[in-house]
Image (cartoon, rainbow, N blue to C red):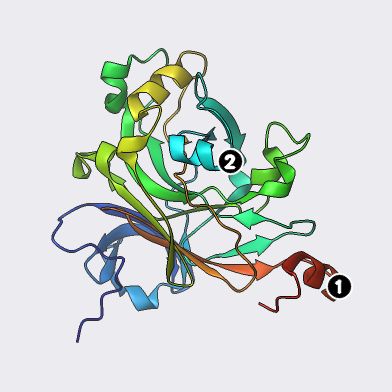
């Protein structure tokens, strides 16, 4: 009997760094096959992990809008002449299997499957040719967004993307050396096991080196900072009760459940069209 979850990659010997709670204690370790090996040396079957924490405590999270041409097209927008950046608050970050809260006032909330780049050392004025020298590794991020707070005067989109729980990340960080083809990774998003979104990092408008060069020209990047690289076409409304599953080649799968944060039955019925999720 195979007890491995299907987000454990087959055929690759890679270092997958995780933060988790087991036996009531916060721990760090590496995911190896169907176990997590804690820094203490103790091994835990994946089923015995109480809580998956975000794999990193970011110094800052730099988000990127409209970095896939097909996503810009589905929103009716032109390709940006330069990277469109925003800061996502650290208070939004949650881990694998944690709950995303559908907030009061939302009528259209959606996922955004994004490759997240983890910075490994302080960097300023980095040239594109040297950009990967400052990268530590990669993980999956879900840049959850309430579209209601974007298509109006909420600019930059802090309220749209900054709610608590709007930054799922994980389940682990994979070392840069273990992802040599980072510019050719497939992204897939499922909602309740139905495929909703597909893309590939080869279609980024601004590549990782270009982003690091652009950002570091005016902002110092610190170890632990995270750059979200944008999402491809295929966003769709999610509702309370839905389960999102974001996959990126070699990085596993990030799964979260939407829970209802709205207060009244009348509001819930109005915003879901009577749907009872």
Q: Position of residue 159 (x, y in %)?
A: 72, 43
The residue labelled by disc 1 is 266
Q: Position of residue 181 (x, y in %)?
A: 21, 40
Q: Are marks 2 and 1 in contact (CB under 8 Å)?
A: no
- Report the quarter where the C terminus lies: bottom right
Q: Position of residue 90 (x, y in %)?
A: 59, 43
Is residue 229 in view from this perspective?
no
Neighbourhood count class around disc 1 (C-alpha, 10 Å): few under 14, some 14–19, many 20 upward? few
Residue depicted at x 77% and y 37%: 152
Q: Position of residue 12 (x, y in %)?
A: 15, 56
- Total number of numbered labels? 2
Residue depicted at x 50% and y 27%: 79
Residue depicted at x 40% and y 72%: 49
**Based on the displayed image, in which of its 4 quarters is residue 20 positioned?**
bottom left
The residue labelled by disc 2 is 75
Query: Nearest the camera: 271 or 55?
Result: 271
Neighbourhood count class around disc 2 (C-alpha, 10 Å): few under 14, some 14–19, many 20 upward? few
């Amino acid at each position: 009997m195979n007890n491995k979850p299907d987000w454990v990659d087959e055929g690759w010997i890679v270092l997958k760094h995780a933060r988790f709670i087991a036996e009531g204690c916060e721990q760090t370790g590496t995911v190896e096959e169907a176990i997590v090996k804690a820094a203490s040396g103790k091994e835990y079957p994946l089923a015995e992990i109480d809580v998956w924490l975000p794999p990193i405590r970011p110094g800052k999270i730099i988000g990127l809008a409209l970095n896939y041409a097909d996503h810009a097209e589905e929103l009716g927008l032109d390709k940006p002449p330069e990277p469109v950046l925003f800061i996502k608050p650290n208070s939004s970050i949650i881990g694998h299997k944690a709950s995303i809260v559908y907030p009061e006032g939302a009528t259209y909330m959606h996922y955004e499957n994004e490759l997240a780049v983890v910075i490994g050392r302080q960097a300023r004025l980095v040239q594109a040719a040297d950009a990967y020298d400052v990268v530590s590794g990669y993980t999956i991020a879900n840049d959850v967004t309430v579209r209601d707070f974007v298509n109006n005067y909420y600019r930059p989109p802090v309220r749209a993307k900054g709610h608590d729980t709007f930054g799922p990340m994980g389940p682990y960080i994979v070392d840069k050396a273990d992802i040599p083809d980072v510019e050719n990774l497939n992204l897939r998003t499922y909602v309740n096991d139905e495929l909703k979104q597909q893309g590939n990092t080869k279609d980024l408008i601004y590549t990782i080196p270009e982003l690091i060069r652009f950002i570091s020209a005016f902002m110092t990047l610190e170890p632990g900072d995270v750059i979200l690289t944008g999402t491809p076409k295929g966003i769709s409304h999610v509702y309370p009760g839905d389960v999102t599953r974001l996959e990126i080649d070699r990085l596993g799968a990030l799964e979260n459940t939407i829970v209802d944060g709205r207060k009244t039955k009348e509001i819930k019925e109005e915003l879901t069209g009577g749907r009872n999720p």
